[in-house]
Amino acid sequence: MSEPRRTPLHDLHVAAGARMVEFAGWRMPVQYTSIVDEHLTVRSKAGLFDVSHMGEVLLTGPGAESCCARLFANDARRLRVGRAQYSLICNDAGGVVDDIIVYRLEPETFLACVNASNAERDIAWIRERAQGECAIEDACDRYGLLALQGPAAVAVVEALAPDVAAAVTSLPRFGCARTQMAGNEVIVARTGYTGEDGFEMFVAADAAAALWEAILAAGAAHGLVPVGLGARDTLRLEAALPLYGHELDADTSPFEAGLDWVVKLDRPDMIGFAALQAAHDGGARRQLIGLEVSSGIARDGCEVLASGTSIGKVTSGSYSPCRESGVALAMVDREALMGGGEEAVELAVEIRGKRKAAQRIELPFYERIRDGVSR
Amino acid sequence: MEFPDNLRYTKSHEWVRVEKDGSVVMGITDYAQDAMGDLVFIELPEVSDEPVAKEEAYAVVESVKAVQDVYAPLTGRVTEINDELPNTPEVVNQDPYGDGWMVRMEIEAEAELEELMEAAEYEEMVSDIS
């Protein structure tokens, strides 16, 4: 096996005492102090994540818009300059190749941010199917990616870059812009993977360490801490954000995963159109639901039972620090879940050979207070 | 990382302390709690006259990232459990050899104690694997 790759921040993580693990072919920090503490700090103050393992692809030129519209399931034609959209790469059978975020940086420049585990395959896929309609550049090595997340993220940006803070903090959700922060050229976007407010910053790989240290220094007074992949996973799970290879894969349709809102069926030349249209019209056989277990964690692969009969499997399960319980996303048979019309089926999960009662929870498990309304 | 001299240790990272009354108290080691990370659930056995066999799984510790059986270092009967732990599993992270103790046992064969590692030997084993 080849050596895991290192992000531009690798040595800083090691120096900070992070516990390093291999993830998707990269050597990454899983925690600096404690997953639970880091998680709760992101919910109450702010956390800084190194997500430089994520892949980047640039699609540029006069044909970039129509190419993105053909290759990705959300409609890139509706994307204005300075906006980003969550999207999917689907295959001809309507399964999911990857879930991505597409940023429109200029009229003819689109940046697609893809999962680390799929980056190589995605870029080959995009190149092959672009058929020369636009230029495709593998920009994975060009950028580091930092995610600043949490209710104090705005205050940290104000402390970090007072000269541009007004413009950056007025970005709407899924807005993006090129700017300079603490002397570094960045593409900043109001996006994230935690269920909190926050920003993600693409920065030149050789400037990533300087920006990382500047953000941590500016954020210290606001309680900002570095956060590892362990809490990134528990945060995204509480927010019910899908993770490729768990909730999404080539055998899962976006409709089963609850991503109906992403797929815009208005482009018959879109890859997978016929299969997606059929899946949409036929109705999903399976459905992604949220479960809570009071003691123990139903992890990936655990059987889900309705009144004693298997109806599907857990796709992601972990501990929810905010609910102080075990929570799980599960892909289950829709009809069996309904129990033939009866309202309440008894749900259970099988954890290490033991059957434990599970409660169905409306997703997400956690939602930040917005407009004074909390769940 | 701590390896108190007055304890005996197993390869599977449990510790044992012999009390004045001859009973033994056991738990998981500092290395074990550190490797697991934040503990979030603990399942303990019930006090029972049924003996637990040496190397039998008698408890379960679960962290955010992993779940692990805890094996009995010795054969014996569970006479007391630390019933605070299921509600405060983080105590095992904070104080694995003190308030994080898991069960007390009356053991059957003192000879089994001699098969367990001394602190120095366990510390050497841990330094080889970490």
Image (cartoon, coloured by chain):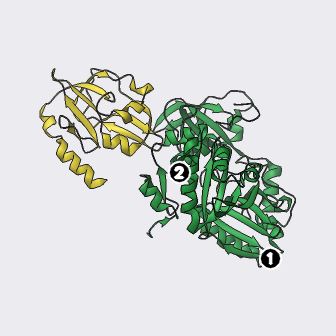
Chain colours: A green, B yellow
Between A210 and A17, which is closer to the camera in this rendering? A210
Q: Quadrant of the C terminus of chain A?
A: top right
Earlier in the chain: of badge 2 and badge 1, it is 1
Instruction: Please state the chain letter of the residue tagged with numbered disc 2 in the rendered image.
Output: A
**Above-or-below relation of A32 to B8:** below
Residue A57 in the image, given as x and y percentages of width and height:
68, 68
Residue where numbered disc 1 is placed: A133
**Disc 1 secondary structure class:** loop
**Residue type at tag 1:** Glu
**Residue type at tag 2:** Leu
Q: Quadrant of residue A200?
A: bottom right
**Disc 2 secondary structure class:** helix
Between A153 and B39, which is closer to the camera in this rendering? A153
**Number of marks in the rendered image:** 2
Q: Is residue A312 visible?
A: no
Residue at position x 55%, y 38% in the image:
A40
Residue where numbered disc 2 is placed: A229
Tell me: A215 left or right of B61: right
